[in-house]
Image (cartoon, helix red, strand yellow):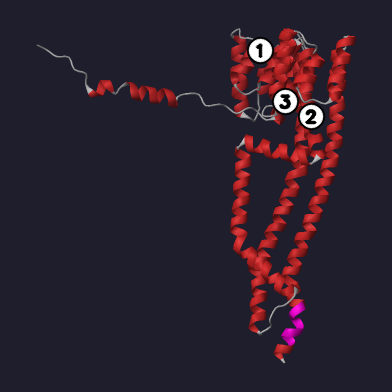
Amino acid sequence: MTSTTTSPKSSAAPAPKSLLASLNKTAKVKEFTKRELVDLFRGLGSMLRAQINTADALKYYSHGLPNKTMVEALARIREDINSGINVHEAFRRSGRFSETIVGLIQAGSDAGQLHHAFKSLAERMKTELYFSKQLKKATITPGCIIGVLLGAFIVSQVKIVPQVEEMLNGVGAKPDGMTAISFQVSHFTQAVWPVFILGIIGTAVVIARSTHVKNLILGFAMSKWRLLRLLIMSMRQMTFISTIRLLHSNGINLAKSIRTSANSVPGTPFYDELRTAADKYEHSGVPLSTAFAKFTSVDAQVTHMLAIGEKSASLDAQLEMLCEMYEEDSQNHMNAFSAAISFVVLIIAVMLIAAVFIGTFLPIFLMGPKMMQSGI
């Protein structure tokens, strides 16, 4: 009688297949930068206005483009469009564009105003890029200046001041007063500076990698500094209101426009608030202004202008006015924020320079007479 047995090789066969399948999973691709998108949407919008179809516009734009990643993505989008896939779905399948961008492309395509959608996207990306650049300029440059001065202070306390102390001890001069305090500060700095530097690096890494920690720190700073809160709130509201306006003006219904606009402010309280307001507006029948007033933390002027738009059937005009208003507010708050940061950096710079000077040269000036007497 023949018995049927399963060989070890055949029983172990599925494991390598599952492993290969997991390895062959498509990794999440990186979205294009705002600067790349501004140039792309400008080019596509201008060609579509010249009555060039979308597939040909993608072909012409990618011809000679130095960014090979974008060339490949645009080629795939063009192939999908030529195979009969909708324009917005082709852009979505590339994985290189956010849902907000895809939603606006869909709105423009459905309304037969795709060139206007691309133009609006380019203008919005340009505005976001400008404010992002201004914010980085107001924070990164001062941070680098403070870092360099802090490094100079640590070097002076770890390398130079000990040499001064050794020189004074060599001539038998006993430090007193400010000189003794300066040497004590040097001893303390020598003991804690490695821990201090590692702490700064670790904190920076945690903030950079953890959105939750970043939001906690930003929320705390916004609660303590009114100017920062006004700046962040105005920029966030400008972002999602401009998205709502772009989508609604291109034929997308208001509830869907609000939900899509939430994708432009991910990781913020507005994300969940906007989606809740959209659901209440769509399913509960409450007015839009009431939904925003009850379920979001937007400014009172937003709900007031929305109420005017609903009553006078001029919602698009009111949304446009709000966009312009918050853009001006963001610019004013950005200027005030930059001035405040510059002043703080100046104060810190003066303090660090004074600390380096006092810690390094003051002991020599104060102990000079004692050194001369010791020499006599």
Name the quadrant containing residue 292: top right
Within the image, what quadrant is residue 207 found in? top right
Q: In this view, does 91 lie above or below 203?
A: above
> On residue 127, which mark appears?
2
Where disc 3 sits, the SS reads helix
Q: Let me know if residue 159 appears in the view.
A: yes
Examine the structure image and report whether residue 246 is included in the region drawn in magenta.
no
Residue at screen point 67% across, 58% down? 151
Residue lying furthest bottom: 376
Q: Is mark 1 on a helix, strand or loop?
A: helix
Q: Nearer the viewer, mark 1 or mark 3?
A: 3
The crowding category of the residue bearing disc 2, from other C-alpha atoms within 10 Å (few below 14, some 14 to 19, many at least 20), is: some
Amino acid type at mark 3: Phe
Q: Tell me where residue 279 appears, x and y as whole percent.
A: 70, 13
Q: Which residue occupies 75% across, 35% down? A: 132
- Residues in magenta? 366-372
Residue appearing at x 69%, y 20% in the figure: 100
Image mark for residue 113: none
- How far apart in space, not on screen, are marks 1 and 3 (Cα)? 29 Å
Query: Mostly what secondary structure, the magenta segment?
Result: helix
Q: Which of 143 and 187 is in front in this view?
A: 187
Q: Distance between the residues labelled 1 and 2?
A: 25 Å
In the orientation shown, which residue stands out farthest toward the front?
294
Residue 236 horizontal/vertical position (percent): 76, 29
Tell me which residue sits at (17%, 14%) in the image: 4
